[in-house]
Image: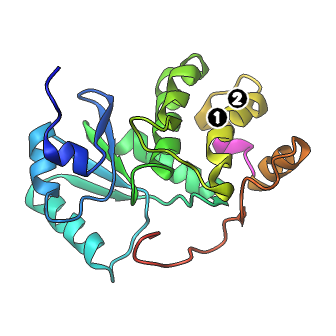
Amino acid sequence: MPEPPILDILYNFHWIREGEAARSSQAHFGGLGRLMRRHGLKSILNLRGENSDLSWWRYERHVCERLAARHIDTMLDSRKLPTRAMLTTLIDAFDQAPRPFLLKCSGGQDRTSLAAALYLIHRDGWSGREIAERHFAALPYLHFPKKHQRWLRLFPGYAQQASQGSSLADWIRQAYTPEDFADWLRQRGQGDTFDRIFTVPTRSRWQW
């Protein structure tokens, strides 16, 4: 099997479903356009939220405009439990994004692993959960969660249990609350796997 191109390695690029959805880190060092052209990417789902005052966000938007690709801002925090609005925005982005699309956060390791797993469950239903959870693997995705990032891997199992047969999208839109998820984690001795429930982003050039 041939070695992947250097940009794929540099940006932690992997297909979720080839020709349909991919995942990566932030494409620093000016290679985003080349990465998108190489893989025929038509849109980016940015998991770091809108950051119009930061150069990486402006560069990413400029590249998408130049390539006539769509740029969609969503937001996840790897240490804070997501609100219903955050997850609803993500599900809507899955449905709206021209394909193939690219899911990316900063390192492409933690938030992107959760988003990739949720996309596959949204796409394939709960029967796809086992395959979806492979996106939390250390290799090749470099998911090595810190103490308050361990909730990410637990979320799909909680979601399937709490949904009681409803689709992921319907459950998120109608029933999910981060408070219930926090209680579920605490009841299972996993209360230390998250920092807190999300309220506002803690800004840094790397986290957001």
Residue 126 coordinates in the image, percent (x, y)? 61, 21
Residue nearest the viewer, comparing 42 with 114: 114
Residue nearest the viewer, comparing 162 with 95: 162
Residue 80 coordinates in the image, percent (x, y)? 65, 61
Picture quarter with the C terminus: bottom left
Question: Is 174 contained in the magenta span?
Answer: yes
Residue 39 coordinates in the image, percent (x, y)? 15, 38
Give the magenta-colored segment's residue range. 172-177
- Give the alpha-carbon distance from disc 2 to disc 1, as whole Å: 6 Å
Do we see residue 83 in this rendering?
A: no
Which residue has dot 2 on it? 160
Q: Amino acid at mark 1?
A: Pro
Which residue has dot 1 on it? 156
- Crowding at mark 1 (Cα within 10 Å: few <14, some 14-19, many 20+): many
Residue at image point 24% right, 53% down: 70
Q: Residue furthest top?
A: 127
Residue at image point 16% right, 68% down: 62
Residue at image point 91% right, 44% down: 187
Do we see residue 108 in this rendering?
A: yes
Question: Is 33 contained in the magenta span?
Answer: no
Contact check, label 2 and label 1, Cβ < 8 Å: yes
Residue 56 coordinates in the image, percent (x, y)? 27, 71
Q: Is residue 86 above or below residue 189?
A: below
